[in-house]
């Protein structure tokens, strides 16, 4: 089909809806279309953005614990670049740029959780080891996700909200539309970028609301450890809107269970135990705040719930995965694979298996050069492959439903289980700590890479990208990002200290909060401390109960693990989406359809703008003399006024979204 005859400006009506029996989803760019996709320009800009955002995100995350969301800003940049060429870049080329650039955040997110801990423990990995951890983890994550693509992307169409993929798709498609729709997206993006930038970067007003200036709320927090939190920013409002009310309700329910049931219950029991310390905490419950109780106990329940929900996800996807391998067996029997449409064509299963085998050999060689026994090498390899595959499903499920990857929880579980298993076989000390952290590093990068890649694949499915093309260039991006992230961390390790200042070392400190936390955990467990199995088991039983009730266990488990300050504004966005969509249904006709479309576009703009504001804010924070007090309002320190203004600002964003969704475009008037 000629390129000029393709309408790339409108998503099909069933793009976000479950399909009826026999119904097919036909993407914007049909399978029969011949549209530029893997072009020199798309690969060049994809690699360039990948390198730039990798450097920026690595420095930012190590310095302030806040990474840079890459995919959404890069999709906006891709649209701008498209107009610089005589032949305007196609929608598929822009998707390739976005996907390749987005790999930066994935590799960095995984690397900064673990690799800096090796330097903080004074184990100083060789540069090749640092790069290999990033590279092996990223490639394994992509390889393990490819057979799952059909399940998450096609079979579950309309059943997972894919919030980030929705935002990326809306940005790319609306950029093609131009006119009023593009202006609406740009308007929402600018508003959210300005709002989130100032609120999260400077002392304008309180970003987090807890309403503890009210005596009754403060009393609940102090006497019962029942704490309410709300992060009043535009990005999370847009995220909740795209997720929808049902998913947002289940998501928030996990946070309600934690903050208003589990934490107060542990506090009630522990407050009557005097000075008794209950493992895994290191001080009595009677001295703990609500945050301490969560960190020392409830967090492990959340990790257990997420891990068991991931196992359920694997079981549910087995049929589709078996179908993918069936295609490979067909190729063996007949000499050729069945002909699939362009939009359903993956890298051959044989290539994937070969890649996994080569990756396994590389990981085994990596562990072998640590001068450990072949038994330990075999165990390390088995644990790496098992966790990487298992958490690939966890990450894909989590991203598909809530756009939040539970990387810290899954990496923590990897560290604990690996340390306990390897201790049984006599591995301990500095070699044991290096071995466990390197293993956890590869697993963490794998689950971050797979979580980010499932977003690309879903956006590509809506648009009409070729999965095999997306998969090929993703490996190029992983290589570029792994090398860049490795050298960036190495250079920063020479210039700074990670974690805590060492007496006599004049270098400045990069906090590296995630790696510092895992350093403490691995040090403790390699010293022979027991694992909190009972807490993991409680989380598992919560998942079992939810599956028995027919509810989404992964969404609820993520709600347990993630802070309430994130889940409550998501619920607000879900409620707003519900009201807009109900109005759309009552209105009906073309205008009703327009209301729904405008709501999604505004929500995508809020996410895009919030991400841009976060990127700019993170960039400012790495400046040596940066201070949040550069901009500070007179009422910032007055908690009651500051929080009420913050609530009013968030409510204004909600009203803006609702009213602008209802507007009839001028062309329709």
Image (tube, rainbow, N blue to C red):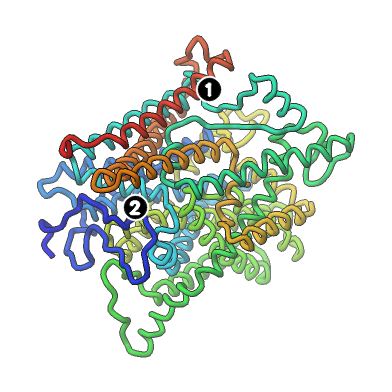
Nearest the eye: 454 or 272: 272
Circle 2 or circle 1, nearest the eye: 1
Nearest the eye: 126 or 540: 540
Can residue 231 be seen by looking at this rendering?
A: yes
**Residue positioned most to the top:** 634
Relative to residue 117, is residue 332 depicted above or below? below
Q: Could you tell whether 250 is left or right of 13 in the image?
A: right
Across and down, in percent, residue 131 comes to: 48, 53
Relative to residue 248, is residue 396 depicted above or below? below
Residue bearing the label numbered 2: 99
Quarter of the image for the N terminus: give it: bottom left
The structure residue drawn at horizontal position 49% and vertical position 43%, both measured from the top left corner, is 489
The structure residue drawn at horizontal position 18% and vertical position 60%, both measured from the top left corner, is 35
Can residue 431 be seen by looking at this rendering?
A: no
Nearest the eye: 590 or 607: 590
Mark number, residue 389:
none
Residue bearing the label numbered 1: 206
Relative to residue 75, is residue 329 depicted above or below? below
The structure residue drawn at horizontal position 36% and vertical position 59%, both measured from the top left corner, is 457
Relative to residue 301, is residue 153 depicted above or below? below
The structure residue drawn at horizontal position 71% and vertical position 47%, both measured from the top left corner, is 523
Across and down, in percent, residue 504 comes to: 66, 28
Which secondary structure, mark 2?
helix
Which secondary structure, mark 1?
loop
């Amino acid at each position: 089909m000629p390129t000029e005859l393709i309408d790339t400006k409108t998503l099909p009506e069933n793009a976000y809806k479950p399909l009826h029996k026999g119904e097919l989803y036909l993407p914007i760019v049909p399978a029969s279309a011949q549209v530029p996709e893997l072009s020199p320009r798309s690969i060049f800009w994809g690699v360039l953005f990948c390198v730039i955002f990798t450097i920026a995100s690595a420095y930012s995350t190590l310095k302030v614990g806040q990474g840079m969301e890459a995919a959404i800003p890069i999709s906006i940049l891709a649209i701008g670049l498209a107009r610089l060429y005589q032949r305007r870049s196609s929608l598929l080329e822009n998707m390739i740029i976005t996907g390749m650039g987005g790999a930066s955040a994935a590799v960095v997110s995984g690397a900064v959780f673990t690799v800096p801990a090796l330097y903080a423990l004074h184990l100083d990995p060789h540069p090749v080891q640092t790069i290999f951890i990033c590279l092996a983890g990223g490639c394994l994550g992509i390889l393990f996700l490819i057979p799952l693509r059909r399940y998450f992307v096609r079979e579950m169409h309309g059943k997972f909200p894919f919030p980030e993929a929705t935002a990326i798709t809306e940005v790319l498609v609306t950029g093609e539309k131009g006119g009023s729709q593009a202006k609406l997206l740009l308007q929402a993006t600018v508003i959210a970028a300005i709002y989130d930038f100032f609120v999260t970067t400077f002392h304008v007003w309180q970003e987090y609301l807890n309403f503890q200036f009210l005596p009754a709320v403060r009393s609940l927090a102090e006497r019962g450890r029942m704490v309410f939190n709300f992060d009043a920013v535009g990005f999370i409002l847009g995220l909740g809107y795209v997720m929808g009310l049902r998913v947002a309700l289940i998501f928030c329910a996990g946070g309600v269970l934690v903050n208003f049931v589990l934490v107060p219950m542990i506090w009630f029991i522990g407050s009557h135990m005097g000075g008794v310390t209950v493992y895994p905490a290191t001080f009595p419950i009677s001295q703990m705040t609500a945050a301490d109780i969560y960190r020392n106990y409830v967090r492990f329940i959340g990790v257990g719930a997420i891990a068991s929900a991931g196992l359920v996800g694997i079981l549910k996807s087995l049929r589709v995965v078996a179908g993918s391998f069936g295609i490979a067996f067909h190729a063996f029997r007949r000499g050729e694979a069945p002909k699939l449409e362009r939009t359903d064509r993956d890298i051959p299963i044989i290539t994937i298996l070969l890649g996994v085998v080569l990756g396994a050999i590389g990981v085994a060689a990596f562990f072998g050069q640590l001068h450990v026994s072949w038994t330990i090498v075999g165990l390390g390899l088995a644990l790496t492959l098992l966790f990487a595959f298992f958490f690939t499903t966890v990450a894909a499920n989590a991203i598909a439903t809530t756009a939040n990857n539970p990387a810290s929880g899954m990496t923590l579980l990897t560290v604990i289980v690996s340390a306990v298993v390897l201790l049984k076989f006599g591995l301990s000390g500095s070699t044991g700590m290096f071995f466990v952290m390197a293993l956890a590093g590869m697993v963490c990068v794998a689950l971050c890479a797979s979580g980010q890649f499932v977003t690309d694949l879903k956006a590509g499915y809506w648009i009409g990208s070729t999965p095999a093309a997306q998969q090929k260039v993703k490996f190029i991006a992983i290589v570029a990002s792994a090398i860049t992230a490795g050298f960036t961390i190495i250079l920063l390790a020479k210039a700074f200290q990670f974690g805590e200042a060492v007496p006599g070392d004049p270098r400045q400190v990069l906090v590296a909060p995630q790696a510092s936390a895992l350093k403490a955990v691995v040090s403790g467990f390699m010293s022979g401390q027991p694992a909190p199995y009972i807490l993991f088991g409680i989380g598992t039983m919560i998942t079992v109960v939810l599956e028995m009730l027919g509810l989404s266990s992964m969404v609820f488990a993520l709600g347990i693990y993630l802070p309430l300050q994130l889940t409550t504004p998501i619920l607000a966005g879900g409620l707003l989406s519900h009201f807009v969509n109900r109005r759309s249904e009552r209105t009906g006709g073309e205008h009703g359809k327009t209301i729904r479309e405008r709501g999604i576009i505004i929500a995508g703009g809020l996410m895009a703008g919030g991400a841009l504001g976060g990127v700019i804010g993170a960039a400012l924070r790495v400046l040596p003399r940066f201070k949040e007090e550069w901009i500070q309002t007179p009422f910032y320190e007055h908690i009651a006024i500051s929080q009420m203004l913050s609530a009013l600002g968030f409510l204004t964003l909600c009203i803006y979204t609702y009213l602008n969704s209802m507007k009839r475009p001028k062309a329709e008037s």
